[in-house]
Image (tube, coloured by chain):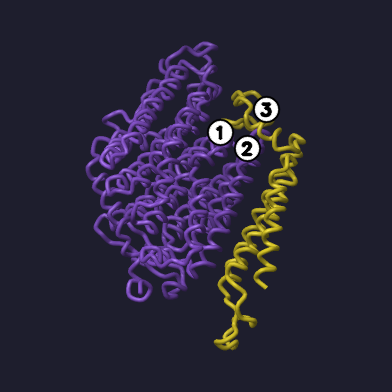
Chain colours: A yellow, B purple
């Protein structure tokens, strides 16, 4: 079974990386999610699939599966999900604010010169001042 | 009592976070909880440094589960001083935030997330388990994401997108590496792994997995060639946030590098050679990148990169003196760099811009601010009586002792160029007249608390410089402990090493 999981991991990781390299921001965020899942599967596979029964107390010594990789992956899935949701929220807000959909335009905006202190009444400027009243 | 002290660095900010969350409707209460939490953390940090300086190494098992199965926690000299200094920078950041916030909601969220960030940072400093380290990295990461985007606005959100994407990628690499280390070696405990590596009986897959892990730490620490995310994003956050990031976040990556490399490769080896080249390239690229910048925080961001190179140089040389230099540099740099960001923020606010071309006149109107800037700026460049001189002195001496004269040359060259950048900020923002006339300066700022915090950091910089002896002794002892990590290896010395 390990070989099947390993190949799946490889394919998923390749897909994830390919999407990460896309210009479209939506694909970049989805690429992170796909790569994250590939890595979760990879971590799980690296722990081996020896044992066929859940590692409960009454499972006995012999055929119980190693619970540690399961615990690791469970932790990683929970964390990865919350980070993915944050990234999606950030993406949504970015698009609402300036309708940018590509990685290039996002870096171009970051590279703009720092705004003046009192330049805009409705936006908090880059130096930490709030002019919103 | 010692068991409580062992978990206190995580427990205090976490409790403050939860209490502040419950009190979220009352901004004054949130501030009070947050500030007293950070003060308590600082006191605990000082107590930990005191214990560590007297040779006590706190260690324990979470939940009483035995060593390779449960999560080990260890606080040695390096961890103790990192916790103390993080608490100090956190406290000053909170003071700056209190002085600066006009918006209730931003102000409240700021306190919550800074406490979350401190939880993650302190957790990373006390853990002796690789997967646990991953979890603490995630805790500090999610807090840093929220802080990065805090305040909103076009430019900041665009920067946050870059920051989030690249840091998520680095963390995924770390997770993959942790999984592969477990798959190859069957353990996630740093001590057991160290025993395995030191006995030379590590299974074949462990070393590549560990090198992959070093790569993820290198991204976190912003080393060449994977430093690009840092100067591209740090200048968009709120001033207080970028100061805290500048002081602490890359340093968590450096701490993780120091911890793992000293534990796993006690002798000079492939990782050290790699790190030596990377360190020199990082110093050069950072300082040359800074020379091309024309905004205060962008110049300072590139200098974070170049300064991280110094610390990694100490780690790469791996002699006792070089490690002591790296530890000393770490402490000095956190104080100085955070302070420069704070002062840069105040200067930008007074001048009405952080573009150097539109700043000026500060030396005449605000001589105290000029003095306050000069102290950390000269210290960063390594001018004698200040803390940076001793940090650079230790590292240059260690490189010459190890006969790596070219690394010493690059370190000195980088110091000269650092001075050049600081000179640029000084000339443009402080000496020259303001383009709109000196009357355009907003000198009346209600920021008393922030001034106190910045002055405290500057005094500490001078103090470390004038009375460097005790801290150098502490750093040398810390380096000795890094070379003989008894507390990490001891649980496995009877069974694991065989």
Callout 1: SS? helix
Please provide percent x and percent y for residue A110. 63, 32
* Residue assigned mark 1: B235
Residue B219, compared with residue B263, is above or below; it is above
Tell me, yes or no, whether the two marked residues, 2 and 1, touch with CB atoms within 8 Å.
yes
Which residue is pictured at 29% across the width and 48% down the height?
B319
Please tell me whether residue B332 is drawn above or below residue B486 in the rendered image: above
Viewer-nearest of labels 1 and 3?
1
> Residue B169, which numbered label?
none
Q: Earlier in the sequence, mark 2 or mark 1?
A: 2
User: Is residue A20 toward the left or the right of residue B206 in the image?
Assistant: right
User: Where residue B235 sits in the image (x, y, percent)?
Assistant: 56, 33
Which of the 4 quarters of the picture holds residue B275?
top left
In depth, the one of B433 and A20 nearer the eye is A20
Pointers 1 and 3 in contact (C-beta within 8 Å)? no
Q: Secondary structure at mark 2?
A: helix
Which residue has dot 3 on it?
Answer: A121
């Amino acid at each position: 079974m390990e070989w099947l999981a390993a190949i799946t991991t490889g394919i998923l990781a390749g897909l994830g990386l390919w999407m990460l390299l896309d210009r479209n921001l939506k694909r970049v965020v989805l690429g992170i999610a796909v790569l994250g899942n590939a890595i979760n599967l990879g971590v799980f596979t690296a722990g081996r699939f020896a044992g066929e029964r859940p590692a409960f107390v009454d499972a006995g010594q012999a055929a119980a599966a190693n619970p540690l990789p399961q615990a690791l992956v469970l932790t990683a899935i929970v964390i990865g999900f919350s980070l993915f949701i944050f990234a999606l929220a950030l993406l949504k807000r970015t698009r609402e604010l300036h309708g940018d959909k590509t990685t290039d335009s996002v870096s171009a905006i970051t590279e703009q010169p720092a705004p003046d202190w009192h330049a805009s009444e409705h936006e908090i400027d880059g130096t930490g001042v709030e002019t919103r009243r | 009592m010692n068991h409580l002290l062992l978990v206190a660095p995580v427990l205090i900010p976490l409790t403050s976070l939860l209490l502040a969350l419950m009190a979220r409707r009352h901004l004054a209460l949130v501030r009070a909880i947050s500030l007293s939490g950070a003060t308590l953390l600082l006191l605990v940090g000082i107590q930990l440094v005191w214990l560590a300086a007297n040779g006590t190494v706190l260690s324990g098992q979470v939940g009483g589960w035995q060593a390779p199965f449960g999560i080990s926690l260890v606080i040695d000299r390096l961890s103790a001083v990192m916790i103390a200094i993080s608490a100090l920078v956190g406290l000053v950041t909170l003071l700056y935030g209190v002085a600066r916030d006009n918006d209730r909601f931003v102000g409240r969220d700021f306190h919550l997330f800074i406490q979350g960030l401190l939880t993650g940072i302190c957790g990373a400093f006390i853990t002796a388990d690789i997967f646990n380290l991953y979890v603490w990295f995630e805790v500090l990461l999610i807090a840093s994401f929220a802080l990065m985007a805090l305040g909103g606005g076009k430019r900041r959100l665009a920067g946050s997108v870059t920051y989030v994407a690249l840091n998520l990628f680095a963390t995924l690499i770390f997770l993959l590496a942790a999984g592969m280390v477990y798959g190859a070696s069957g353990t996630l405990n740093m001590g057991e792994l160290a025993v395995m590596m030191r006995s030379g009986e590590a299974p074949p897959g462990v070393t590549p997995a560990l090198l992959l892990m070093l790569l993820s730490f290198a991204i976190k620490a912003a080393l060449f060639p994977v430093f690009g995310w840092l100067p591209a994003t740090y200048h968009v956050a709120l001033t207080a946030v970028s100061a805290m990031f500048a002081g602490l976040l890359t340093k968590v990556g450096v701490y993780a590098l120091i911890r793992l490399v000293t534990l796993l490769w006690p002798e000079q080896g492939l990782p050290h050679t790699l790190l030596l080249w990377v360190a020199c390239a990082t110093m050069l690229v950072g300082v040359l990148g800074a020379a091309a910048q024309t905004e205060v925080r962008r110049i300072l961001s590139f200098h974070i990169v170049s300064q991280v190179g110094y610390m990694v140089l100490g780690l790469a040389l791996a002699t006792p003196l070089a490690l002591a230099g790296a530890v000393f540099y770490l402490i000095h740099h956190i104080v100085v760099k955070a302070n420069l960001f704070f002062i840069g923020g105040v200067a930008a606010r007074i001048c009405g811009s952080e573009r150097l071309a539109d700043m000026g006149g500060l030396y005449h109107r605000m001589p105290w601010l000029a003095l306050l800037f000069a102290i950390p700026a000269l210290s960063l460049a390594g001018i004698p009586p200040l803390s940076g001189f001793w940090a650079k002195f230790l590292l240059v001496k260690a490189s010459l002792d190890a006969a790596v004269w070219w690394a010493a040359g690059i370190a000195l060259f980088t110091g000269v160029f650092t001075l050049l950048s600081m000179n640029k900020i000084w000339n443009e923002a402080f000496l020259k007249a303001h383009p709109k006339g000196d009357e355009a300066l907003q000198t009346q700022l209600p920021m008393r608390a922030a001034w106190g915090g910045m002055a405290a950091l500057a005094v500490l910089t001078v103090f470390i410089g004038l009375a460097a002896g005790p801290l150098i002794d502490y750093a040398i002892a810390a380096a000795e402990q890094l070379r003989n990590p008894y507390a990490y290896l001891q649980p496995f010395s009877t069974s694991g090493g065989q």
